[in-house]
Image (spheres, rainbow, N blue to C red):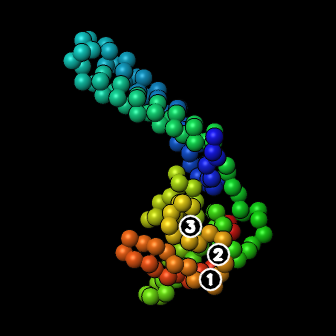
Amino acid sequence: MQKTAMTINGELALREELEHLIKVVRPSIVDAIATAREHGDLKENAEYHAAREQQSFAEGRIQDIEGKLSNAQVIDISSMPQGDRVIFGSLVTIINMDTEQSTTYRIVGDDEADVKAGKVSYQSPIARALISKEIGDVVVVKAPGGDVEYEIDDVVYS
């Protein structure tokens, strides 16, 4: 089975979500099902059906997270010596060559990606264009609105 790249923070977030689902969400759903059963006829009991649906979603998410963690390849670049090359997990500052606008992204795994928080998946077009390039290199990103040129201004391993 193929390993999934993940940062240390991404693994920690998944483990925290899993713990919350198992220790908080699952018991509350079991209580809701028990309470709904006490109300009698289960065929027409909306509370019961809603609780069962919540249980289904929670159990599915638990299985999903456990699967991701079992196939995770956690990459810690903080212990690596600082370099100029863009790699998985690095914090990259790029400058749009047309607008001179500076943007900073961290290249992370698929589950961690959140563009609003400045985290892009290593499989995204911008990350694929940046990975293995160095400070000062100009890269072309194929965007839906057309090709955009960026210059790599800074790379931090943290």
Q: Is residue 15 above or below residue 108?
A: above
Quickly name the residue at label 3.
128
- Asked if marks 1 and 2 touch (Cβ < 8 Å), the reply is yes
In which quadrant is the C terminus drawn?
A: bottom right
Q: Give the residue drawn at x 24%, y 24%.
A: 46
Secondary structure of the residue carrying tag 3 is helix
- Label 1: how many residues lie within 10 Å, few (<14), some (14-19) or many (20+)? few
Query: Is residue 61 shown left or right of residue 9?
Result: left
Q: Is residue 32 above or below residue 153?
A: above
Q: CA distance from mark 1 to mark 2?
A: 6 Å
Residue type at mark 2? Lys
Q: Which mark is residue 133?
A: 2
Q: Earlier in the sequence, mark 1 or mark 3?
A: 3
Q: Is residue 70 above or below residue 158?
A: above
Residue type at mark 3? Arg
Q: CA distance from mark 2 to mark 3?
A: 10 Å
Q: Earlier in the sequence, mark 2 or mark 3?
A: 3
Q: Which mark is residue 137?
A: 1
Q: Position of residue 48 (x, y in %)?
A: 30, 22
Residue type at mark 1? Asp
